[in-house]
């Protein structure tokens, strides 16, 4: 039974369907691993054995009766703690929400529960999803299962560490500037950020609403495709949710890659990328050529402006979104104050951490009357140029490839003293969010200190099925995605 920790979602569904294992047994297997291994990883911030087993029992009844069974019924997963989950605490990695129990489910949570999946718990993350290392969480940093002295990436670091350590077969994540892809890369996993608007943001605590997008994190592209099938779709409760015909994201998985055109942006292969990352990415590209793909150089001339534009737009939206946390309606309230204004200011001063405060200050500054044109408006114009670069690039290729992160997982404290160094961790992922494009990361080898390296695939708008096809064919030819950290066995 312990072999099941390495199984794909399809293999787990088969084991459940053929009664080799029950949903309760499967949930128990992972709950026991969480109990043993989480103290050293800090990936889970909330678990509740009774709630999990109650869901598993319902799944077992469905499996027994054969009614309402889906490809995911009875399979456990865990949610990033940014998704509202009815009856479970939803903290968003912040003291501000450390006592918040949501009265409703996020759309993503609801859809996965409707598909019969069993919730193992809630996963640690950078506070309000601001960070690239999980060091900004109120609940303390998450450790990378490949090397406990290193960060797992962020902000979905809990999701990544939990899957890498096989504490859960899959997890949800969110990606505003790279928070699904970068931790997936640093922990040796597969993660997918869909096209903006494909997955509903309802019930996902807002960071930067025009960039935020939820997506699956798992061991393989095939697993991500199954999960995306369950979470994608129109939702009237999110005004930016797109009304599109239903898609089966698995439909192209088995297509051969002969004739595939891969665009390599010059700007992603210049200085900035560590040489060990470069070696692994080059080897992956060589494998793609063996699979019948050709590579063509493309230009993304404005991509150098993506980090500065993002760090104007994302904080601007965050400063507005986070104004709702005022100590009045829910969340943290300062214990002592003399009047209403002091109650607001003390609650916010005590409830938010340093990085969140930095973003709120930058955001209110760039939106202020005197600076709006100089910063916010200019950043919006750059955003448009970045999207236009991609339109041109996709005239020459089917997908774009490059590194996900400029380096492998770094040590705790290596970048936390210098915010700009930390912000540069997302240099290859941020332009995708600014353009609203889908992107993936998949493991493509190991670099310095035997840490995993991620290959990034950027798809055209609504090109998820194509990206998944391209990733799956590589995963059929290689086994990087099957490796797990020795210490977690
Ligand atoms: N690291 C980036 C930031 O700190 C991206 C975070 C994210 O995608 N949520 O904003």
Image (cartoon, rainbow, N blue to C red):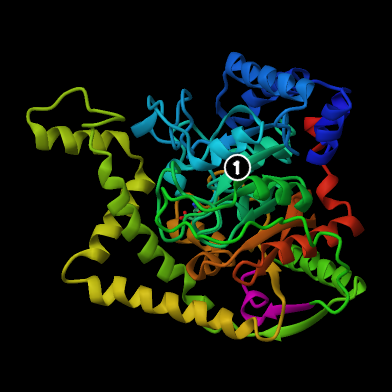
Q: Position of residue 26 (x, y in %)?
A: 77, 23
Ligand 1 within 8 Å, label 1 CB: no
The answer to whether 223 appears left or right of 159 in the picture is right
Write the residue at 42% across / 61% down.
210
Q: Position of residue 103 (x, y in %)?
A: 40, 28
Write the residue at 40% across / 48% down.
206
Residue sitting nearer the eye, 116 or 21: 116
Q: Which residue is mark 1?
A: 172
Q: Considering the image in quadrants, where does the C terminus appear?
A: top right
- How many numbered badges does the structure rendering display? 1
Q: Position of residue 458 (x, y in %)?
A: 65, 68
Q: Magenta stretch: residue 321 in it?
A: no
Magenta segment: 261-273
The quadrant holding residue 379 is bottom left
Residue sitting nearer the eye, 273 or 394: 394
Tag 1's secondary structure?
Answer: strand
Residue sitting nearer the eye, 284 or 413: 284
Q: Position of residue 164 (x, y in %)?
A: 72, 39
Q: Considering the image in quadrants, where does the N terminus appear?
A: top right
Res. 447 in view = no
């Amino acid at each position: 039974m312990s072999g099941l920790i390495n199984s794909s979602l399809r293999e787990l569904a088969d084991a459940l369907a053929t009664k080799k294992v029950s949903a309760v047994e499967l949930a128990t297997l992972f709950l026991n691993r969480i109990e043993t291994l989480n103290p050293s990883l800090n990936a889970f911030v909330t678990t509740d054995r009774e709630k999990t087993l109650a869901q598993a029992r319902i799944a077992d009844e469905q499996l027994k009766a054969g009614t309402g069974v889906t490809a995911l019924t009875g399979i456990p997963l865990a949610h990033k703690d940014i998704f509202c989950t009815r009856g479970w605490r939803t903290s968003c990695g912040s003291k501000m929400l450390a006592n918040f129990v949501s009265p409703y489910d996020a759309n993503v949570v609801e859809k996965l529960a409707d598909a019969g999946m069993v919730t193992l718990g809630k996963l640690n993350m950078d506070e309000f999803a601001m960070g690239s290392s999980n060091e900004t969480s109120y609940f303390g940093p998450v450790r990378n299962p490949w090397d406990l002295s290193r960060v797992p990436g962020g902000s979905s670091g809990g999701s990544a560490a939990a899957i890498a350590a096989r504490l859960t077969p899959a997890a949800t994540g969110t990606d505003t500037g790279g928070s699904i892809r970068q931790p997936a890369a640093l922990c040796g996993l597969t993660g997918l950020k869909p096209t903006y608007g494909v997955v509903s943001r309802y019930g996902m605590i807002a960071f930067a609403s025009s960039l935020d997008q939820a997506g699956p994190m798992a061991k393989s592209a095939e697993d991500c495709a199954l999960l995306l099938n369950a979470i994608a779709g129109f939702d009237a409760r999110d005004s930016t949710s797109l009304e599109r015909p239903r898609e089966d994201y698995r439909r192209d998985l088995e297509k051969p890659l002969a004739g595939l055109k891969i665009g390599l942006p010059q700007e992603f292969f210049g200085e900035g990328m560590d040489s060990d990352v470069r070696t692994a990415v080059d080897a992956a590209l060589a494998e793609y050529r063996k699979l019948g793909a050709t590579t063509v150089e493309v230009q993304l001339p404005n991509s150098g402006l993506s980090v500065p534009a993002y760090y104007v737009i994302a904080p601007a939206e965050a400063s507005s979104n986070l104004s709702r946390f005022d100590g009045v309606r829910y969340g943290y309230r300062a214990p002592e104050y003399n009047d209403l204004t002091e109650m607001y200011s003390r609650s916010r001063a005590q409830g938010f951490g340093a990085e969140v405060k930095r973003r709120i200050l930058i955001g209110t500054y760039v939106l202020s009357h005197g600076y709006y044109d100089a910063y916010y408006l200019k950043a919006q114009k750059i955003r448009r140029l970045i999207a236009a670069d991609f339109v041109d690039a996709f005239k020459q290729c089917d997908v774009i490839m490059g590194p996900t992160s400029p380096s492998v997982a770094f040590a705790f404290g290596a970048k936390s003293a210098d915010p700009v160094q930390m912000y540069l961790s997302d240099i290859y992922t941020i332009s995708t969010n600014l353009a609203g494009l889908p992107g993936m990361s998949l493991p493509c080898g190991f670099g310095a200190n035997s840490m995993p390296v991620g290959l990034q695939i950027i798809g055209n708008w609504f090109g998820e099925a194509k990206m998944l096809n391209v990733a799956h064919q590589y995963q059929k030819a290689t086994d990087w995605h099957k490796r797990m950290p020795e210490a977690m066995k």
